[in-house]
Amino acid sequence: MTRWTTLESELTTLSELLELSVNDEEAQRQIEAEITPTRQAVDQLELSLLLGERYDNSNAFISIQPGAGGVDSQDWAEMLLRLYSRWAQNRGFRAEIVDLVPGDEAGIKAATLELRGPYAYGYAKAEAGIHRLVRLSPFDSAHRRHTSFARVEVLPEVDNAPEIQISPDDLRIDVYRAGGHGGQGVNTTDSAVRVVYRGGTPDEIVVTCQNERSQLQNKETAMNVLRARLLERLLERHAIERSKLKGVHQDAAWGNQIRSYVLDDRRVKDHRTNVETSNTQAVLDGDIDLFIEAFLRWRLGNEE
């Protein structure tokens, strides 16, 4: 008996019991209490069906870059890094920062977070896009309202993707002494790795990794990120071609945010699904599953 059949049987039984207990309030309360876990099981099973694309079960890389907004945006980028680290921990994923460039005054200039766990990419891909923060700036002496942006990229980790071919002639690999984050001993050896790729792309791709003490491990991680970026470009080209065939115009302008976090109004809203919450602190602490699950259902409906 499949899980779907089991749940269907449970729901049928509960429905029949409700009909039989129409005049028994105590029995109805007990049945309603049993309905909740069954409904949750149906929701989770439905969600698993939405994660059926080719790379959904892969590990993932989340890259965060500040946009317009100066030091406020760099601080916002660091807040997002904390958000995704907390979210990953809540879901039971293993999360490691593989590269981080601190800001000059506060926040970060760039960061890449590696997520390892079942369907890490399938869930995390909902977060790709521009994230907009509106708040009373702690960096403004007049404490005025500022708007900041940050771009989030989500890439699947791919060990062997036949469509991705990397020639050694297209690579330049530099090693250097890691600085900043990385733990004890990070500055004692030239273990950080920078990979520059110039093969068949309009712009060169630069990937750095300084998380591990081993130069070999850092190179392997950097190459994994490079493969993921190349795959992302390939999938993006395919998506654009499909959109052209459907007559859909995709505007990739920097200000087209997928989600707004308005802290002084206590409001976080996803502009794709219109899902909204007033619990801004919970969201900043990594409680974003409501947005992710709504996105997966919205995306399925928009692809039909």
Image (cartoon, grey):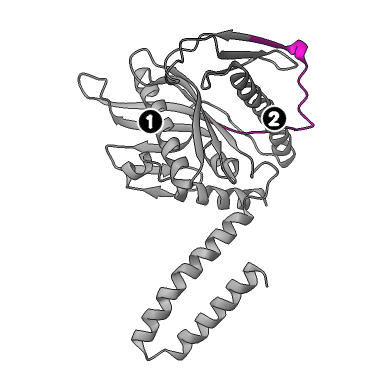
Q: Out of 202 and 112, give the one closest to the viewer.
A: 112
Q: Would you place residue 17 above or below residue 223 in this image?
A: below
The image position of residue 146, as x and y in percent, is 31, 26
Residue 271 shows which numbered tag?
none
Which callout, 1 or 2, points at the residue further toward the start of the chain?
1
Image location (x, y in percent) of residue 180: 42, 15
Residue range (magenta):
153-173
Q: Is residue 6 visible?
A: yes
- Residue 79 numbered tag: 1
Mark 2, Cα crowd under 10 Å, few <14 / some 14-19 / many 20+, is some
Q: Residues within 10 Å of mark 1 (few under 14, many from 20)?
A: some
**Image quadrant assignment for residue 137:** top left
The picture quadrant where one finds residue 191 is: top right
Q: CA distance from mark 1 to mark 2?
A: 27 Å
Three-letter amino acid code of the residue under disc 1: Met
Specify whether residue 154 is painted magenta. yes
Question: Which residue occupies 59% across, 60% down?
Answer: 46
Q: Is residue 304 above or below residue 89?
A: below
